[in-house]
Image (cartoon, grey):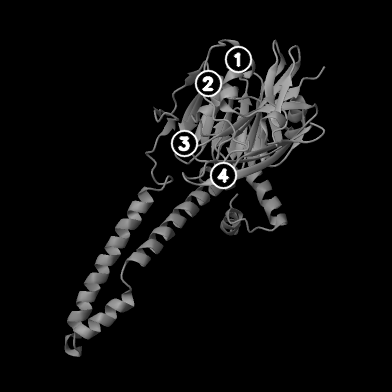
Amino acid sequence: MIQQDDDRLLQEYLDRSLSPEELHAFEERLCNEPELADRLITFASDDLVLAEWGAAIELEQQTLPDESTAFSRANQLFSRSNRTVAISVLASIFSILLLLGGYYLYQSVLSSPFVSISEDVVFSSGEPIKNHIRQTLKQGSAELHFPTGAKVLISAPASYEVTGNNSMHLQQGSFIANVPSSGIGFQVDTPHGRVIDLGTLFSVQTVEKLDTRIQVYRGKVIASLMNRAGGIQSSKQVSEHHSATIDSFKNEIAEDSDTLSLAEKCGILNYSDSVVLQENMPDALATGMYQVFEHDGLAFIFPERMQVLLNSDLMLVAKPSEIGPSQRAGMVSAGTKVDCYRIYYDPAVQEGAFIPVKGEIHFDRPILGVILDKKILSQTDRLFHPLSLKNSNRQFIHQGTETDTGGNDPQARYDEVSISPDRRTLSFMLLSGERFVDEFRVIVQSPH
């Protein structure tokens, strides 16, 4: 139920000016009051539109003549006896300026993603997707771009449909979604419940006859258990580094800390806040084809392939912090079992700008080395790329990671990768831009 003071609370929530006590109480209400959550979505939309209006008006005020200057010139041109005529002329000029201002304001509103309701949801290729048409994905991946800025990467096998400019239904399958502040309120319905996003990076996996699992990597979502009539039966807020399962058979939403369970499964003890651990790696990760992994200051780690038995010696970089080739080089002998992880960083900044990411990953087994060069990445795809299991001759595009190897340019800025003396901790500082990707492989000894 909407209360009298809710508009103030909504505005302060968007402005991040609520006290910790108010924030906790308000987010509890968001979980339990669908009407309030809907109002938050509307409020966020209005807030962005008003901000764009203000920017347009400020721009007009900078470019249009100062009103007081216009009146001063008019007094010089007209005598007191002609004051009535002067005022009429000035009134006409002022009316024209208002009309021009209104026109530019109208154009700015039309350009707003919240006002342009005719804008389509599209695939990453630009092909529009019709609403309420069941889509089946039998292999590979598909990325959906919503007009609100939300991006969703769906992995096969999956069955889904777009239900609106900021909503979809996932009947079966899995996806990862990157939702900016402009997409707050992005809604996903499944056979078991509903997920409403509050501006996050999260994933959803659903099996039609079992349950729906949600993982939140950044931000928060509201997970809801739905009744047969389509109403909300119960809701729970799922926070960063946590997961929840919507189980319609048990009639409950079970939440737990996601970081430890997934990391332990992947052989990782812990990692820094600038790193996101993903259980599954998309097929064409480093082609620049998918934007869902574009994130400033956030690197992803994917377990690429586990328990690989080497049939021949593997050359890699054992000491990446060294400069000389002989000091850097290392070799893993044939017959060794290894696990391979992929580190990936793709910032979303504008062209010409570069932004760094620093991170640490602590493994529970020794790090044997890294593969940084894009040529060596391509050569080792046959060993470690999951899709090479079916076709060992398939070619993939890589960009690699450029560390300092004693080049001649002292002013060049390089990526930095290092391994701790005990060989358990990987540290990195990657520097990349809008048209570039940093990626490399980490080779770790498999458990016995």
Query: Along the polypeptide, which appears first: circle 3 or circle 1?
Result: 3
154 vs 74: above or below = above
Crowdedness of circle 1 by 10 Å Cα count: few (<14), some, many (20+)?
some
Residue found at x 70% / y 51%: 24
Q: Amino acid at mark 4?
A: Ala
Res. 396 mark: 2
Query: Along the polypeptide, which appears first: circle 4 or circle 1?
Result: 1
* Residue that mark 3 sits on: 146
Crowdedness of circle 2 by 10 Å Cα count: few (<14), some, many (20+)?
some
Crowdedness of circle 3 by 10 Å Cα count: few (<14), some, many (20+)?
many
Res. 412 mark: 4
Quadrant into which the C terminus falls? top right
Q: Amino acid at mark 3?
A: Phe
Residue found at x 63% / y 59%: 17
Q: Amino acid at mark 2?
A: Phe
Query: Along the polypeptide, which appears first: circle 4 or circle 2?
Result: 2
Q: Is residue 428 left or right of residue 286?
A: right
Say which of 237 and 365 sits in front: 365
Residue found at x 66% / y 43%: 358
Q: Position of residue 291 (x, y in %)?
A: 51, 34
